[in-house]
Image (cartoon, grey):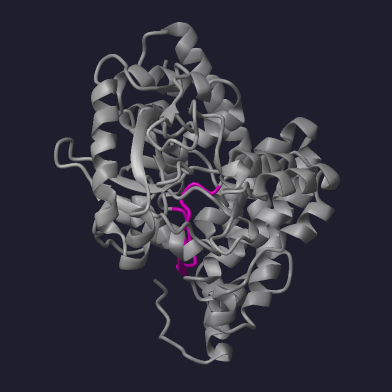
Amino acid sequence: MTDTPNPTSRAARRAAGKRLRERVTRESLGRWEPGPRRDPLAILRAGDSGRLGPLVPLRYARMRENAFAFLRGSAAVMAADLEGAPVPGIPVQACGDCHIGNFGVYRSPEGQTLFDINDFDETLWNVDFTVDVKRLAASVALAALPRGEDKARRAAKASARAYREHMRELANLSPLAIWHSRIDLDHEVGRLGDGDLCRRLLAEATAENEDGLSRGDAPKLAVSPDHTDPEAWRIADKAPTIFHEGPDGLTEAVRDAEAALLAYPQSLTADRWTLVSHYAQRDVAFKVVGIGSVGLVCAVGIYADADGAPLFLQIKEARPSVIGQLALHPFSVLSEGQRVIDGQRIMQAASDPFLGTTFSEASGRSYYVRQLKNRKLSAVGEILSESGAKAYAQLCGTTLARAHARSGDAVMIAGYLGKGSAFDEAIADFAMTYARQSISDHALLQLDYQTDPESGAA
């Protein structure tokens, strides 16, 4: 928290944010260097504790693919690197793993197609806003580096500038207006990527079948000889990422997730419980997802209503956030699953109506539940991300500002950021430094594997 009084007027809060520059200059945000005892592989290995052993090698195999994959899987490393770094001390609900791969397209419960942050495994309240901004900018720089250092720096700077400028716009709005703000995807599709292709995919993904189910909501994951028979739906095994049976505790993990899913409706409010009660669980299978999440229990359940229309829910193990040490003040959470869904509801413009949490007494695991992502909408997000690096960086920066302004003091943040480019330049400096460090860390992981393929990071 800040050491300033608790001002109430917009002018006073803006002035308080501006005064924070005296204690933590914006230029200081750009300075970072690795500590003398820094050991990224040791941090990664520590994170393997409690993961499902047979899947840990897959986690490292994915991280070895390239430096960006390493960055995606090493949120804990970056959190350790940011510990002790100067921050102005303005708290927000942080994403915690705010790289460009964790933004995307989804449908709101009202049927709107939105662009937003879409992964909240590491979300945490009471974290300085610069933590997310730095991770976003570093990921932008790293993704753009193959096109040259100048383009990488400009893209990283663009993400910070977009964040600063949109936060300034939001600072003029009421909290209610901020809460209801959205990212106009139709406008962004026309400005980014292959507009015609994106529009076609959007139309395809959001079109409804006769039963009212969005076509994009039924991925090529399940099989049903007769989809009108609710008993017929089953999830197709696609080893090694989707399976019902597995070695060394994996089958037990599937059963644990299946039982936890049955208990999950108890966490829902009456209106959500009523909706879920129209569906019955038909099958559950393990699903390996992401990079940082590999080795945690994650499963997908297929449900069907009385007429056989399917619903896909994903259940995922929730562990303590890797950015816990970056909280401005210590605090407790009801459960790790609750932490995740609360963070998602706070940061997203519109949240999944099926969000819920559950706990397994048998395994001691905390879980959260959400709808399985619409694969065709995810494809739209991927096309957008492959468009111009600078334009996509601006979109992500703008989106992050909106997400932060829902929980943080937009006026105070805007006061700290100011009108000029000092903040943008500093974040770009940090991003380039950290992108190069990620390349070195990735090379270290590769060397470790070549030296000892049986090591913990192999």
Q: Does residue 45 belong to the magenta stretch?
A: no
Percent position of residue 284, x then y: 35, 32
Residue located 14% across and 36% down the image: 362
**Toward which corner of the image does residue 442 lie, by quadrant?**
top right
- Looking at the rendered structure, the number of numbered marks drawn on it comes to 0
Q: Is residue 386 above or below residue 115?
A: above
Along the viewing direction, whichever of 276 and 379 lies nearer the viewer: 276
Q: Is residue 117 left or right of residue 166?
A: left
**Toward which corner of the image does residue 165 lie, by quadrant?**
bottom right
Along the viewing direction, whichever of 282 and 268 lies nearer the viewer: 282
- Which part of the image, by quadrant, shows the C terminus? top left
Q: Does residue 95 belong to the magenta stretch?
A: yes
Residue located 37% across and 48% down the image: 279
Along the viewing direction, whichever of 73 and 290 lies nearer the viewer: 290
Q: Is residue 253 left or right of residue 327?
A: left
Percent position of residue 175, x then y: 53, 81
Magenta residues, dominant SS class: loop
Percent position of residue 78, x then y: 47, 42
The segment highlighted magenta reads 85-98
Percent position of residue 419, x then y: 72, 74
